[in-house]
Amino acid sequence: MEIAELITDEGEAYLGWVEEFNDGETYSPGYGDFALLDLLHPDDVKSLRTGTKFADLIERAFDDGLKTLPIVLPVNQMKPEWRTAIVHVVENPGSRLTVRLSPVQIGEYGRAEMALSGWGEENQRAQVVYIDHIGPASAEVSEKVSQALDTADFRTLVANNLPKPQRSGLEAVEEGQFLRDILEWRVGSEAQVFVAVYDVGQGSASAIVDSNEHPRVFFDMGKPISVFNHTRPLNIPKFFSCDEEKMSDGHPAWSHAPIVLSHWDYDHWAGVLKSAWVKTDKRGHKYAKLTLIDGALDRYWIATNQEHLELAPTHMELIRQLLKTVNGTSGQTALQYWPSNLPYLQFSHGVIVRAKPDEKAETSISSRRNNSGLLMLITPTAASIGLTPVGLLLQGDARYESIPLN
């Protein structure tokens, strides 16, 4: 039996996803020489292998969510065989890594750090973990866990059961009408809007704001992973403070500014993390405890369904918390998936468009995520999609050639 299979069967190893791998050859040496891995705790690997489905995990309490450990491993801390295994996973979508941690660093290799942390001063320095083994996971384990986290049926159920708002006593059946209503609740009454692009360091966070600079609709809510912590500004905007003031003034719940998410990459959503502490369980295994900032769940999120693009456990934990949160008025979950057959959606001050990978776009998982998400064009008036637009384009990480706009 292969060592990777033996370790996994003993329940002592993490199952790893490769979120990003920069080998210092594609990028300038010293800039991008690291691997960003997302690890699934052995307990959850075991439960998902034996029949637990993601739809079942939705019912877990927030404190008992997926146990995940996103880490950054520098290339100079990789043994040659580790690097070989990581490259294999990058080149073979669907394959996974078996990763075993150690309480101390063994020799000169294996020092990694927590990829995500909170905004607080006490949490600026990333926490360190140590690795003593990385190898290919067995096909059986990779397939079973991936299938268990594949929530296509569940997500489709959510997307296809959007409420149909009433219009003069008649049911509105237009595709995406509920998503438009979410936007119009916040910006429809504004005669003029502006756009704020916030400095969060290596990440993406923007918003449609009113004349008082109060956010009405957010576009992305990101921050850097730990390897780019040095790019963070000293003072981070308190994005939800205006919403908190409105709530205290008696405004109804769930009138918070919604978040339109361009795509499911850390640096586009991790700004909603209050903290991501490394915990240790009774058996000595480490995992990340993800806590979201106040107000992150009490609003609608609009995003594309990218579960087929190797979403890692940390992404799934955010999705789990969003799907578990329900607006008591509408009965709808905080996360609203963009309908697969909706190319664009126009609203009072612009249009949201779904990107489509052009023929010259790379076929990697990262590129496919970047070029199949949402982008937003904010215009001075509700210009027709058929006219030449004038305004500001928020494109996430999509290539211009993958944006279906004139």
Image (spheres, rainbow, N blue to C red):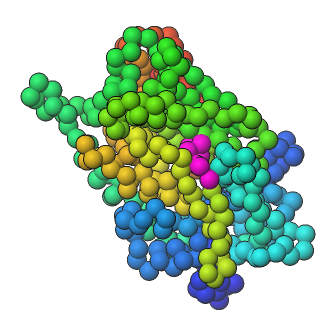
Q: Quadrant of residue 164?
A: top left
Q: Which residues are magenta?
A: 268-275
The answer to which of 14 and 250 lies nearer the viewer is: 250
Q: Is residue 152 above or below residue 304?
A: below
Query: Quick check: is 2 in the magenta stretch?
Result: no
The answer to which of 376 and 204 lies nearer the viewer is: 204
Name the residue rendered at 53%, 19% in the picture: 213
Seen from this angle, which residue lies furthest right? 108
The answer to which of 383 and 187 lies nearer the viewer is: 187
Is residue 175 among what the camera can see?
Answer: yes
Name the residue rendered at 79%, 41% in the picture: 230
Left or right of 254? Residue 216 is: right
- Where residue 74 appears, x then y in whole percent? 81, 57
Magenta portion: prevailing SS class: helix
Name the residue rendered at 54%, 61% in the picture: 313
Left or right of 214? Residue 202 is: right
Is residue 386 among what the camera can see?
Answer: no
- Where residue 185 appears, x then y in whole percent? 33, 27
Q: Quadrant of residue 136?
A: bottom right
Left or right of 142? Residue 126 is: right
Name the residue rendered at 47%, 49% in the picture: 306
Q: Quadrant of residue 97?
A: bottom right
Q: Is residue 190 above or below residue 239?
A: above
